[in-house]
Each structure stands twice: as structure tokens, then as C-alpha cells.
Image (tube, rainbow, N blue to C red):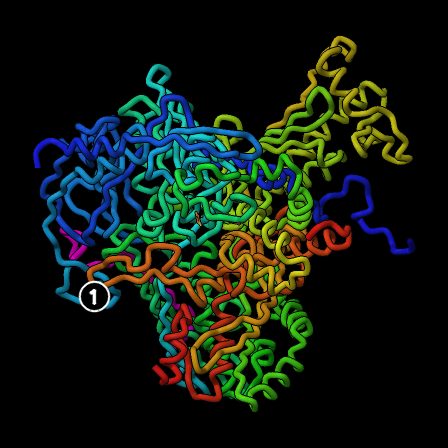
Amino acid sequence: MSAPLTSLDRPNSYIGRSVPRPNAKRLLAGRGRYVSDLKLPRMLYAAFLRSPHAHAKIVAIKTDEARALEGVHLVATGEDLAKICTSWTGTLDHFKGMTSTPQWPLPLERVVWAGQAVVAVVAESRAIAEDALERIRVDYEDLPLVVDIDAARRAGGPLINAGSTNNVCFRSQLDSGTVDDAFAHAAHVVEEEFSFGRHTAVTLEPRAIVADYDPSAGMLTVHHATQTPYQFQDLYSRHYGIPEARVRVIATDIGGSFGMKLHVYHEDMAVVGLSILLGRPVKYVADRIESFVSDIHARDHRVRARMALDATGEILAMDVLDLTAIGAFSTYPRTSVVEGNQVIRLMGGPYRFKNYRATLEVLFQNKVQTSQYRAVGHPIACAVTERLVDMAASKVGLDPFAIRARNVIADDSYPQTSPTGYRFEALSHQACLKRLHEMMDYDSLRAEQADLRKRGVYRGIGIATFIEITNPGPAFYGVGGARISSQDGAILSLTPSGEVRCLISVTEQGQGTEAIIGQIVADQLGIAQDHVKVVTGDTEVTPHGGATWACRGAGIGGETALQATRVLKRNILEIAALILQEQPAALDIIDGQVVDAATRQQRLPISEIARIAYFRSDTLPPGTQPQLTVSHHFAPQGYPFAFTNGIQGCSLEVDVETGFIKVLKHFIVEDCGRVINPMLVDEQLRGGIVQGLGAALFEECRYSETGQLMNGSLADYLVPMPMEMPDILIAHVETPTADTELGAKGVGEAGTAAASACVLNAVNDALSPFDATINAIPITPTRVLKALKRF
Amino acid sequence: MSGFDESLLDEVDETVRVRFVVNGRKVACEVAPRETLVDCLRNALELTGTHAGCEMGACGACLVQIDGRAVHSCLMFAVQADGAEINTIEGLTESGVIADLQAEFHRRNALQCGFCTPGMLVNAQELLSQVAEPSREDIRDALSGNCCRCTGYEAIVDAIDAVAKARREAGGTP
Ligand code: FES
Ligand code: FES
């Protein structure tokens, strides 16, 4: 073996290594512990009667027959729960002028979307609870409803919230530079109106919760399939008036989340109340149909955008209007305007131009709430920007790679500030562009495309450059008054046998949090990874922190673990130095052994230090107090976000007879800073891309004119399945952030961020011989045929 | 309508005794006629490795082996399975028949949240027992009823592909 030694050849070097996830074996054996699996003694089951109307007044609710059914323990209405739970309002202070009406677990007077939970039944089994639902009668009086964006904006149209003068939740404007002037002097202007359908997360395990209130202890335990247990501990405590320390939220195995499982849902809040009313554990697991009508939806934007360029194809300005409809309320506690806000701020992000203007209008409508879902705002901003760039390229006569090469912010010009106010520490657009060009074998793809076109086969090639927001700091939610943490915490103990237990606030939903935290601890301490046990997801055990959302697990959670481990190591070496009569600085730890730092000669196993410290402290010098448990918190500082960047490419074929699209191959070059586990990063990218491809091609929540969700089942709502998905090629560029020792940024949303944009560009490329264009997502066969005027 | 319809209650209460061989062990249970097999496995028998993602045959999370074939346990009433031999992920794990698939899934991280995984493994085992040399296309096709929302499917295809090759090389029965 003559390969040069790398840092990975050091013993216990785990950062950068593709090690498998320790917890995956359990899941492979069918030993997952999902909330939907949980059964507690004396547990009861909840089911909800849902509104058939999108907007109606509740006139009367008759529940006597349901109450009389054997096995039914409680039938509760909005009034019953409002007696013990305070209402919530989904606004944040830093979104000036934002409105939303107060929400209760179950509605008091009106229903505002079809599918909203109205009455709860708790019974000995879910089946009995559902039988009881059939015996409840609710009298409604229809109210005028608002379904689409135009209707929501129409003056004099129906109003969703009585007392308000319009259906606007929030308006915002950005204006930097002299946009009108730039457009007036531009050599080229491209302009388009885009529409982005509603889609939803479809986590394979639907939402699940078991609330267990013990009146004798005044203690609430909630097993909750959520990403953010600390957030819910705070919410349950405040809205039900239970001291925070007496609320415990446990989130063990979660069957997918993607941002969907961090919002407050009416049913979840209700289940907590039902358990308090009964003093018994109550379980609720949404079925798939309920998931479709009550999980948050995402996107739903109409965007009008134009871009000005000079004669050489240099971008001069962008002017954007984003209209987005969010349902009848803004979600709590993160609000439903974060997406739109990010759309207008991420527009044009990879490019170097100064003149930018954007208007955002967030509107209410009688549908279920929309809110943060994987890659919040990114796919919209990316699709609009990248489509305009492609349109500009063809107008100017440049290749898609060439126009991007001309406009991306140069790799050697950082730090930079975007016209929308984002600060970039260091990005690598040029390197990524170059890498993608090679990886796609772009020139031969183009040659093949031209060849096939002559034979009536229409292939398209699309590329899309993106930036991604990761590692959000306190200015994200905290500044708006939300009790959502941007810091994380870790508690690290050396056990008596010389192993390490790490309790950490970032949570695991399958992306590998526990694995990478274990890698970081083992690496930094100098022990084998299987001697590190990582514990996540229990507010009673793990320290408070932001948990896992917006790509903060590795960048913030990982840094927390790294810093905590360094403190523990220092403490271990201090004790070792006392025992060995050495200076701590002369010692190190390798493979669980304290060694001489210079010669690497073994001195003492750390298990021996633990034994002495725990059991024979009498042999240590007087005054020694061994600190073999350390607790450490880390809050991000420096840049408000660690922006990442990358570029995706896509090769696909459009069947112009049927409108069907076959994605042949997908490519991504991604820069997430320091890579901790390449295999896990690649899988995150692939999973994210597939979710983005689903949005691009299949997924859409379709509503009727009366506000009924028309495709609320997995037979009608299409998600990407193995057969439709391509192989995905991945390459990395690494630009670590200097804000942390670890240097890691996030990666979970990168795949989703640009997949739609890529497909949109590729389909338009394929259709270019027909003078047909597509400007709507998802790109369904019908839309393709309509664009081709064949339908 | 006054009061409630007593006959409805009787119907709900009525249970039927069914017997199966589950994971090699004879079991009997009382089930309501409307109870699906997946509910019976998960609730009465506490075999929670079998998951329910859609309850309409679209996602594949609930696949179990019945008399040697992969079957959607959400599309079957428990009473229909009376007399059948059923293997769930728990039994397949214990008997070791899918140990190679599990090891390869682990090695390649062909799972994230793991919710789809038991169904994927049951289906992969079915495929490999039917087709000795599946192409990647065959594998994707065989999994076309197994939804995974976390992975990009590719690692799953890679893992099954690798096991197919290894089993062939080992000369084991297809
Ligand atoms: S639960 Fe049976 S196929 Fe989805
Ligand atoms: S691993 Fe989560 S659904 Fe497949």
C-alpha cells in the first residue's frame, strides 16, 4: 500500500468517514419504536369528526348518541377544550403588520377548511371512537368561501376573518437599487408568470401522539412524533398551564418529518387536553386521509418576475411579485409567512447584481394551512430565477452554462452581501459549475440530444444553480418572539467503564443525527465509535435546544458535540495527569488509551481513570473533584446563516404524444462545508432530490371549487416511486464555514431546493423545437400536452 | 332516530376466532370481522414491525409473507388469513433468511427513518426468490409499489442488487 496517509488514517478519525448508522440495525429488524407502535396501560384512543364544509358557521353539535355508545369515554367539543387550553396566534413580531386569528384545539363558532377537526371522541378503541363519530350531528350554516388566490385578493369578495377588511395576512416589500432605471436601460428583458401547486409532506408514518397526563403528579408526558420536542414542551406547558419541568416530551423513532412535524396541529393540542380531562393516556394517529386534509401543505405560489440583462448577458436587475395563499390561519409558532419571505429573499441568490425589487403578498383562503416544508421557499425562488436565466440565455444566444458562468458570484470575491440583504461567507459557484459540466459530460449529452431530435425523440437538459440557508441563528425566530431555540446543548459523561454517553438536543428522524454525533465525539475524544452512546429526543433527559430543523443538526448540533467533547477530554486528561504525575498538555487520548502526546506511548486506559475517579477518589490528591460529566451549550454566532451552494443537472425525455416525462439521470454538485459522513450526506441529497422531483412532476393537492381536497389518498396523490426515479450522481466541493471549529453546514434541503428548477428547465429545453413553454409546477402530462396544444 | 340501533352494536361486538402460524408459532385470536390483518398483527399480536402507511395497498409498508408470498396486510381482513402461515419482519429477522439483505441495507444506509423498510425487505426477499438475476430495472419495477419518502431509492436498489449477486455467487437456491 503506497497511498499517502490522510487525516482519515489517524486512529479514531471518524469525521469524514462513511460509517453506517448504529441505530439503523434496529429499524431493519422491525424493532423501531415509533409513536404509532406505542401502547400504554389504560390507554384510550381518539378520533375526530371533521368538517365537510370549507367555510361554515357551527349552529349546533349533538353528541348524546355518541356519548351513549358503549366504550366511549369522552366526547369533547371546542368549548370543552377551550376551558382548559389558551388560544394561540400564528404571528411573529418581526413580520410587521402580520395578522392571523386566534386558534383553539377545536373550533368554537366556525369551520374554515374542509377537513378541520370539529369534535373529538375518546374510546376504548379507534374503531369504537369512529363508530361514535357517525352518531354525532353537527348543524352547519354555509358561509361564502374563498378558494383560489384571485378570489382571496378580490375587493368586495368574501372575507375569511370577520372583522378584517381583506384577506391579507402579510405584505412585504424589498427594494434595493434603481430597478426601473435598470430595466429602462436593459438590452434584454425576460418575463414570466409562474404557478406552483400545493403539495404536502406525506411522511410515510402519519402524525402520531400519545398524551399521558397523570393528575396525581400533575405531570404531562407526551410521546410525540415530532422533530422539536423542546418547542412542544414549552407550548404544552404554556397553553395548558402546567409548569415546564412537569411536561415531558419524548420523540423516539419518527417515520419521516421534513418540517411537517414541527408545527402545532389542532388535533395534537386537543389530544393533550383530552388526556388532561380524562387523566388517562390518549393516543391519536392520523390515518392517511386525515393526513392529507390536516397536515400542513406547502408552496402554493403565483409569481410574476422579470429580469433585465445587458447585451452580453450580464444580469442587471430583477423585479418580482410573489402571491402566496396559506389557508385560513397562519401556523403556530413559526407562522406561514416564512416561506414567502424566503422566496423573495432567495431570488437571484447565486448571482452578482445590485438592483432588486420584490413584493410579497400572503393571503388567507379556506384551505388547510401551508407552512414550512423541506427547503422552505427555496424551490420557488430557484425555479423562478433559473428559468429566467435560461430564458435570458436563449435570448442573448448563450449556452445555459455560459450565462451562469458569466453571472455567478466569483469564488474569490467573498464575503458578499446579496441585494436582498443576505450575507455570504464563502460559496463555490464557479467550482461547482465546472464540476457539473464535467460530471454530466455536457457536450456529449448535447450531441446525443441533437441526434435523437432528428429521430423524433425529445430530450431535455436542465441545470439550476442554488443557495441554501442552513444553521439559522437567533435572528430567525427568536427575534420575532417565538420560543424556538437556535442554541443546542450536550451532556457528555465518561461512564465507569470508560465509555461515553452523549445526551444531545438535536434529534434523529433517520437522517443520521445519532451517527454523526457519535462520530464527532469519538473522533474528538479518541475512542472507538461503538463506545459512544448517543441519546436524543427526550426533554427530561437531553438538554434544551433547537433540535432538528432548517439544516442545523450537523452544523450547530455537531459543533455543540465537538466543543463538549473537548471539555470532557480536558477534564479526563487533568485527572490522568494527576494520576501519572504529568502535565495534562503532555498527554493525549488514542483508542481509549491515555498516551504520551509526543511518543504516543500508552500510559493508562481511560477506563482506569474512570475507575479511579468514580470508585477510588481517595487515591487522588486532596481537593480533586473529578468532573467526568460535562454539560455544554453552543449558540451560533458570526454569520446569521451558514449559506451553502451547489448546482443540479437533469437529463430527461418528454414523450410528445402522451406528455409523459421520464427523468433519465440527475446530477448534483454540492458544497455543504465539512462533510462528516459522506454516505449520509449523499443519501440526504438523494432523498431531497427525489422529494423535489415529486414536486416537479407529480405532487399536487387539488381542490374543487367548493374547497374540497379532491385527491386526498395515496392512490390519487402521486408520490415518486422507485420506477419513476433516476439514478443520481453526486459530487462534492468542500468550503467549510470558519464560524465553527467543525466547519459543517447543512445539507438536508439542497436536493429539494433546485430539483424543480432543473426539471422545469429541462422540460422547456425538450419542448424548445415546438415553441412550447411550461411555467407551472407540477409538470403533469396534461400541462405538457396543453403547452404542445395537443389537449 | 331515537337511542341507538342495538343491532349495530352487536355487529361491532361480534368476534371470530382465527388461527394462524405467525413467525413459526401457532397463535389464535379473537378478531372483529372488520379488522384488517395489519391491525391484528400490530395490535393483538404486538408485532409492530409491520407498518401501515396508507391502508389502501399503495405504499407497501404493510407487506408480510403469507404462505411464502408477499401480501399487503392492509388489504386483507384478519379472518381471511385464518389458517395461513404468516411471516413478519420479526420472524424473518429471527430465522435469518433476510440477514444478508439487512446487512447490505445497513452497510449502504438504504434506509433513513426506517418506516418503509420492513415492507421493502419483504418485497426484496420475494423478488430474489422469484428472479435469480434481476436487472436494476427489474428491481425498481419490483419495488414499484413500495413508497419511501426519505431515501432516493438508489441505495435500496444497490443493496438488493448486491445481495442478488452475492446469493448467486454463493450458489444458493434462487
Ligand atoms: S399500508 Fe398497506 S400498502 Fe400502504
Ligand atoms: S426510510 Fe423513511 S420512508 Fe423509507
- Residue A229 lies, in percent from the top left, at 45, 36
At 90% from the left and 31% from the top, the residue drawn is A601
* Left or right of residue A436: residue A725: left
Residue at the far top in the pictured view:
A618
* Left or right of residue A86: residue A676: right
Quarter of the rendering containing residue A318: bottom left
At 18% from the left and 29% from the top, the residue drawn is A67
Q: Is residue A680 above or below residue A70?
A: below
The residue singled out by tag 1 in the image is A151
- Residue A163 lies, in percent from the top left, at 14, 51
Quarter of the rendering containing residue A47: top left
Quarter of the rendering containing residue A712: bottom left
Whether A174 is among the magenta residues is yes
Name the element at disc 1.
helix
Q: How many marks?
A: 1
| Circle 1 residues within 10 Å: few <14, some 14–19, many ≥20 | some
Q: Is residue A690 above or below residue B99?
A: below
- Quarter of the figure that contains the C terminus of chain A: bottom left
* Left or right of residue A476: residue B10: left
Whether A606 is among the magenta residues is no
At 12% from the left and 54% from the top, the residue drawn is A143
Q: Nearer the viewer, residue A763 or A174?
A: A763
Is residue A674 visible in the rendered structure shown here? Answer: no
- Residue A411 lies, in percent from the top left, at 64, 67
Q: Is residue A335 above or below residue A724?
A: above
Q: Is residue A619 above or below residue A512?
A: above
Identity, as a three-letter code, of the amino acid under mark 1: Ala
* Left or right of residue A38: residue A710: left
Is residue A765 visible in the rendered structure shown here? Answer: yes
Q: Nearer the viewer, residue A133 or A465?
A: A133
Bounds of the magenta segment: A159-179
